[in-house]
Amino acid sequence: MTRKLYGHQSEKLGDPNQTSLFKDDPFMKPEQTGEQSEVPTSVGTIERRPRRKRVEVNTANLPHKEVVIDKPDQHCEYGHELVRVGKQFKHQQLISIPAHHYVEDIYEATYKCVDCEQLDGDSHFYHGHAPQSLLAHSLASPSMVTEIAYFKYELGVPLYRQRNYWQHQGIDISDQCMANWMIKGVEIIKPVYQLLHERLMAQQFLQGDETPYQVLREPGKAATSKSYIWLARTIRQVEHQMVFYYYSASRAGAVAQKLYRNFTGVLQCDGYQGYNRVADSVIRSGCWAHVRRKFFDEAHVDPHHFKTSKGLTLITEMFNWERQWQGLPSTERLQLHRSKLKPLIEAFWAWCESTDLYANSRLRKAIAYALGQRTALNQVLNFGELDFTNNASERNVKSYVIGRKNWLFSTNPKGAEANAIWMTLIQSAKANGVKPRDYMEYLLKTVSQLPTFAKEAQLEACLPWNYEPEPL
């Protein structure tokens, strides 16, 4: 408990000779007597740390505006007029201009043809074509809905806290109204979300994970019960990155079966049994980070004595090799896996089978978990495209968890589904190097003007890797 509260969270193996933060704590020692205090102590030299360099603000992508401050009186002390011969640089400063909000009153210009009216006596009127409103009978615009969504899903500001911000901006809007805009907004862009899922299921390699979520008004369930957000994403080696969140009321294997339908490839995930329900055409691959974590926790049972098992040492050596191979092509990685990684994995399994421990020990449980995932963990020797861990999907789950800690729950399933759709498009845009705010506004502007049953080619142009930002 002390390590969980105050210790470091990294699972890196440090210097075994490094002392513990809580070992030899002076406050845990008995109080010294007067005789003990008279013992002379040697005073060592204090080693100064190197001065920390100032971290500059990166403004490489910002435009520069030159401001030249003129002399108020352009005459010398004798009254002669001065002639400007140059300028001297003084300093730089970063300028921020607050957001500007206003209401657009949109009209369509009306025209009539006077010549046709003289010919047949009838009035012929023509009108401009105003774009369709984002939400019928609503003040919501693509830019306003985007700003609210960006605040909530990217910056983690829940709607009830946003209300105060908008009031200071002169916009009196309730959190209920903003919630309705979030739900109605995803109904517009949901076809892109569905197309993204189809493209994701066509991949050869996927990674998956899930995390609990609370929905207050889930039909047939108590408000305190758990719902779940499932995650599926592409591996890091593919050109077009996709991060897909899916809301479900349960963690049952039937949900995994539905989420990964039409997928025939390799799925990398943890040891949760619910993934056993995916189709037989899917190959399960394991995550070595989950295995290592159990051995790492076992080594920290005693906070004063870090005991590294042989299994943890072997896994750490595997990670060190894999860290060096991350940027290599898949064919070269596969050769290295079979030449250098395979002997370490075989030595690890041999150690697991030969280690005899009592039934309730943490090390035995860690070994049992590893042996249960043996076939899935060995898949890294068959595919060079596979990552050694499932950490990429866990990082995307963490992005959702950070948001969950701020907005806490969803009132109904529609709100939970809206969260999953917004997060999918935002995280997919970020994974492809696209600015999420610009991309969301583009989606709302573009998809809202498409016909009800848009063609696949029209939706394909709205996927993150096909988005081209407007020139400044």
Image (cartoon, rainbow, N blue to C red):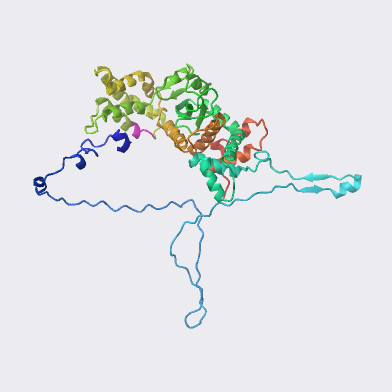
- In depth, the one of 387 and 445 nearer the eye is 445
Residue located 69% across and 42% down the image: 131
Residue 20: give x, y in percent of width and height. Answer: 23, 38
Residue located 90% across and 48% down the image: 118
Is 322 in the magenta?
Answer: yes
> The N terminus appears in which quarter of the rendering?
top left
**Is 304 on the left-hand or right-hand side of 91?**
left
Q: Can residue 236 be seen in this view?
A: no
Q: What stretch is highlighted in magenta?
A: 321-326
Q: Can residue 166 be seen in this view?
A: yes
Residue located 56% across and 35% down the image: 463
- In depth, the one of 88 and 109 nearer the eye is 109
Residue 401: give x, y in percent of width and height. Answer: 45, 34
Residue 277: give x, y in percent of width and height. Answer: 47, 17
**Is 116 on the left-hand or right-hand side of 205?**
right
Q: Quadrant of residue 331?
A: top left
416 vs 273: above or below: below
Is 85 in the magenta?
Answer: no
Residue 330: give x, y in percent of width and height. Answer: 41, 29
- In depth, the one of 294 and 191 nearer the eye is 294
Q: What secondary structure do most residues of the magenta stretch adopt?
A: helix
Q: In which quarter of the image is residue 446?
A: top right
**Is 355 on the left-hand or right-hand side of 336?**
left
